[in-house]
Amino acid sequence: MTRRVTLREVADHAGVSVTTVSNVIREWPHISQETRQKVEVSIEALGYVPHPIAQGLRTGQTYVIGFIVPDIANPHFAAMVGTIEDVARTNGYNILIFNTNDDEAVESECIQQAVKRWVDGLLIVQASQATKTTETLKSINVPVVAIDRIPPDFEGVYARSDNHQAAHLVMEHLFNQGHTRIAHLAGPQGAIPARDRLHSYQEFIVTHQLAYERITYTENTWGTDDGYRMMFDIFEDDIQPTAIFASNDTMAIGALHAMYERGLRVPDDMSLVGIDDIAICQHLTPPLTSVRQPLMRMAHASINKLLQLMDNNNDVTPESEIFAAEFIVRESTAPPKQS
């Protein structure tokens, strides 16, 4: 392992004090050009690299941004990470990822760990069942931007998609195809997006005076196992739906598996729609109709808003944004069979 060159060694090589070397690195203006050049030559000759933590302690800036996500394995959040890392890198920042496993206690610990690591700013996607996220965030002195799942009492800057509109697009599409028995696989109600999608489903039922309403819930997660299990719960009903609206694509994939095991053909026997439009949707059999969330736009907006908040010379607080979703029609939906 290569030993790190110290400030003292650079100072001795250049024939100056450690303070002078530190001032050159910090680009302090009151140093002669001759002295600055001697120090820079020594830095180059010895291969000195400033220690990021020590440099952060001196300057009050580490050029590190913390990003707290519920599930890094979820394609929805993984896509955000890639975009945010690209923008951060372009602006001279590194991203430190914290995975909460969708657990409130772990989330709180991650927030504190981010602060201890001297992050300059924090991006956060709230855990599904978190109730004290805002309280924890208020206790830290770090700029924060919330993404996607926004705590109900959060008063800061955020970027999210319009989940109510996304669910309405699903219901409108299925209804226009002739479906009146639409069941909803609801996500955990501690997650604001899942709650918004459920409320939109219920509002559509009432507005269009549909006689059929069937909701099945998952408690903490909304993955493939949940969608699979919830479908078998629906299979127990005497009256079966003609279409399934899953709260997200991963649940829809689990539902599709359950339908296959039950011997149902999609969309001939039952239509299926999800939300998120993760990459695998177009490769399923049949390709999944879904609602595309503007993940890249949300990710770009969130990191840029955080960069604005971290700019000490910028007195303007960026505005929060809500992004519209886009409906993507594929082969998993069709008009119901006549009965």
Image (cartoon, grey):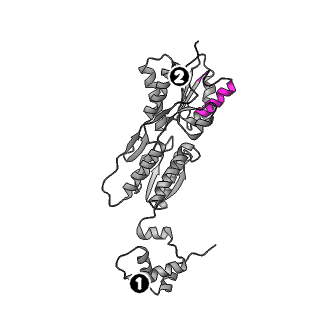
What residue is drawn where x is 51% and y is 47%? 80
Q: CA distance from mark 2 to mark 1?
A: 76 Å
Element on which disc 1 rests: helix
Residue 164 is situated, as x and y percent measured from the top left of the image, at 43, 32
Q: Secondary structure at mark 2?
A: strand
> Which quadrant: the C terminus?
top right
The one of 213 and 45 positioned closer to us in this rendering: 45
On screen, residue 312 above or below 80: below
Residue stretch in magenta: 252-270
Task: Pick whichever of labels 2 and 1 is earlier in the sequence.
Answer: 1
Visible residue check, residue 187: no
Q: Which residue is mark 1?
A: 35
Dot in front, 2 or 1: 1
Report which residue position mark 2 lands on.
182
Going by the numbered disc 2, the residue's amino acid type is Ile
Tell me where residue 261 appears, x and y as whole percent.
Answer: 69, 27
- Point 41% across, 77% down: residue: 23
Q: Amino acid at mark 1?
A: Thr
